[in-house]
Amino acid sequence: MSIAHKIEQLRSSLPEGVSLLAISKFQPIEALQEAYDAGQRMFGENHIQEMAAKAAVLPKDIAWHFTGHVQTNKIKYMAPFVSLIHAVDSFRLLREIDKHAAKHNRVIDCLLQIHIAQEDTKYGLTIDECRTLLATEPWRELPHVRITGLMAIGSNTDDMEQVRGEFRQMKQFFDELKSTHFADSDAFCQLSEGMTDDYPIAIEEGSTIVRIGSMIFGSRGY
Ligand SMILES: *Cc1c(COP(=O)(O)O)cnc(C)c1O
């Protein structure tokens, strides 16, 4: 099935309030252009240089989301144009993003990445670490970053009840933060979760942005 057809099929299956982020890492420009021609405007990349190179040649009305691990020394390459950074997992990173966003007179939207899956990884905050960050760090004093929600990667398992439980926990935590820190902010409204293998469950459990790669583009040419 063509990329355009996949995009159309996916888009018509998503409920209102859920947006489709096309994860285009390692895909060639032509594949992104085909998705664009089918109406797709949100693309996600995991490597800053690759994202910047694609942004330079593709149409300017694309919203580029960065979904990879953020390396401090590369923030400067995306600060001029990135639309949403999905995987912020420390106050230090928020401060660095703020610093670079200021140079471009921008406010950059960020999601806090929560480590919810069973796999060991050094990325993402635990729920407790995230509570502590928001309760103790002066994130409100960073005028050039705005925290607009949470992001998570579900466990890589066939046990869909496990994954559902993780997404459910994310939604509960999102609601907790909404009432404790963001009651006055309409901008705190995004829950980025769900990939090719688990996005229907993520939607049932409250996702607002699904990040879909291989289902749209096929396997990645690493
Ligand atoms: C690669 C990737 C995706 C897309 O994964 P698929 O299984 O190909 O849909 C989503 N989110 C993140 C963070 C990724 O790195």
Image (tube, grey):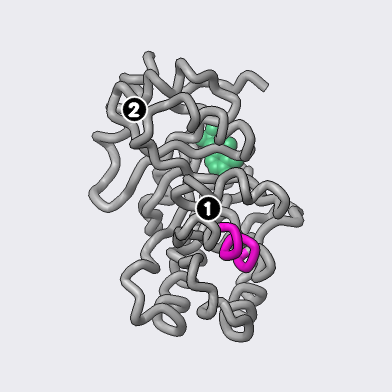
Few, some or many residues within 10 Å of mark 1 (<14, 14–19, 20+)? many
Q: Is residue 171 left or right of residue 158?
A: left
Magenta residues span 94-100
Mark 2 vs mark 1: which is more N-terminal? 2
Question: Which structural element holds mark 2?
Answer: helix
Residue 181 in view here: yes
Q: Is residue 86 above or below residue 5?
A: below
Q: Is residue 97 magenta?
A: yes
Callout 2 touching callout 1 (CB < 8 Å): no
Which of the 4 quarters of the picture holds residue 68? Answer: top right
Q: Which residue is mark 2?
A: 7
Q: Nearer the viewer, residue 4 or 74?
A: 74
- Residue 86 drawn at (x, y percent): 53, 53
Residue at horizontal 63%, vertical 85%? 136
Q: Is residue 118 above or below residue 64?
A: below
> In the image, is the residue at mark 1 within 8 Å of ligand 1 by its beta carbon?
no
Residue at horizontal 70%, vertical 56%? 123
Which of the 4 quarters of the picture holds residue 95? Answer: bottom right
- Residue 148 drawn at (x, y percent): 43, 64
The amino acid marked with disc number 1 is Ile
Residue at horizontal 35%, vertical 67%? 187
Q: Nearer the viewer, residue 161 or 187?
A: 187
Q: Residue 85 has which mark?
A: 1
Residue 166 in view here: no
Q: Nearer the viewer, residue 33 or 129?
A: 33
